[in-house]
Amino acid sequence: MKPIEGRLQTGEHILVRILEKKADAQIVIAKFYEDYGSVDVSCATDMRQLDKTELEDRVNQVIQKNLAVKISEIPREQANDLPNITNVPEAVRRIRTVEIFGFDKRACKDPHVSNTSEIGKFRIIKVKRVGKDRYRFEFSVE
């Protein structure tokens, strides 16, 4: 695991949930590097037109709520309502979930923090178009 990966992963969950609610975006793929992360979303709205500072502020407001983050595992039959379940291969029968209490719950196999306050300050580095209706958000944590 990269030193800040859990912080980046959990911050990415918050960002994606906000984008899902705000613009009906759907996650395509997330990648994590030594000191930043990126997430590609599919959306009819031009994500480059969003106010980056406002979006960053919304993510940081959730972080500052000090929400507990719980990792659990559920049978696939109980995972149908998860927003990203279609990204998990059908052969996987037990789904590992990450729940940010009162905010988001989704399938994820990667490391996370145990409380949003551990993320630190979330920064959106840039937003760019990477295909038709596909946008990449690059972000970091401080």
Image: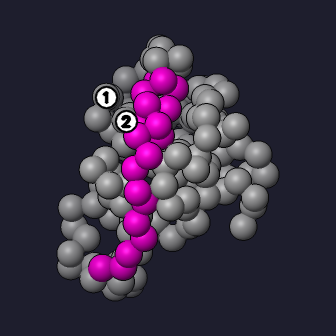
Q: Picture coordinates of residue 78 (x, y %)? A: 20, 75
Which disc is residue 34 wearing? none
51 on left or right of 82 = right
In reply to whether residue 63 is colored magenta, the answer given is yes
Q: Picture coordinates of residue 55 (x, y %)? A: 46, 24
Secondary structure of residue under mark 1: helix
Residues 70 and 31: in front is 70
In reply to whether residue 115 is colored magenta, the answer given is no
Q: Which residue is mark 1?
A: 22
Whole-angstrom CA distance, mark 1 to mark 2, is: 6 Å
Residues 40 and 37: in front is 37
Secondary structure of residue under mark 2: helix
Could you tell me which residue is drawn at 21 percent across and 79 percent down? Answer: 77
Which residues are drawn in magenta? 55-74
Q: Picture coordinates of residue 2 (x, y %)? A: 75, 61
How busy is the neighbourhood of tag 1: few (under 14 within 10 Å), some, or many (20 plus)? few
Vertical arrangement, residue 57 with respect to residue 111, above or below: above
49 on left or right of 97 = right
117 on left or right of 133 = right
Q: Which residue is mark 2?
A: 18
Point out the image quarter for the N terminus: bottom right
How busy is the neighbourhood of tag 2: few (under 14 within 10 Å), some, or many (20 plus)? some
Vertical arrangement, residue 96 with respect to residue 42, above or below: below
Residue 111 found in image quarter: bottom right
Could you tell me which residue is drawn at 46 percent across and 18 percent down? Answer: 54
Could you tell me which residue is drawn at 43 percent across and 31 percent down? Answer: 61
Q: Is residue 11 visible?
A: yes
Could you tell me which residue is drawn at 44 percent across and 46 percent down? Answer: 66
Q: Amino acid at mark 1?
A: Lys
Residues at badges 1 and 2 in contact (C-beta under 8 Å)? Answer: yes
Q: Amino acid at mark 2?
A: Ile
